[in-house]
Amino acid sequence: MNWNQIKGNWTQFQGKVKEQWGDLTDNEITEIEGHRDQLVGRIQERYGIAREEAERQVNSWERSLA
């Protein structure tokens, strides 16, 4: 699955994002609107991790959807 598919179906993926990163609020997930860089940034901020680690988590999550 590529990111364009995720972005195009963001409302369907919001629940999966919440399952993976439960500390993100519903409002934050809605505001991200499928923008990958915003998701990475929110994960980085919320969990206090390096951007590289947030990128790794998103990459892993994206691969798990395929």
Image (cartoon, rainbow, N blue to C red):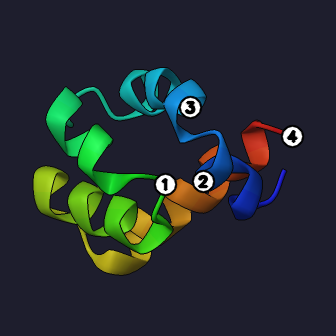
Mark 2, residue position: 7
Which of pointers 1 and 4 lies earlier in the amino acid sequence?
1
Mark 3, residue position: 13
The three-letter amino acid code for the residue at tag 2 is Lys
Q: Tell me if I can see residue 40 in this picture.
A: yes
Badge 2 crowding class, 10 Å Cα cut-off, few under 14, some 14 to 19, many 20 or more, is some
Give the Cα distance between marks 3 and 1. 9 Å
Point out the frontmost of discs 3 and 4. 3
**In the rendered view, does 12 fall on the left or right side of 41?**
right
**19 vs 3: above or below:** above
Q: Are marks 3 and 1 in contact (CB under 8 Å)?
A: yes
Give the Cα distance between marks 3 and 4. 13 Å
**In the rendered view, does 31 fall on the left or right side of 11?**
left
Badge 3 crowding class, 10 Å Cα cut-off, few under 14, some 14 to 19, many 20 or more, is some
Point out the frontmost of discs 4 and 2. 2
Which of pointers 2 and 3 lies earlier in the amino acid sequence?
2
Mark 1, residue position: 34
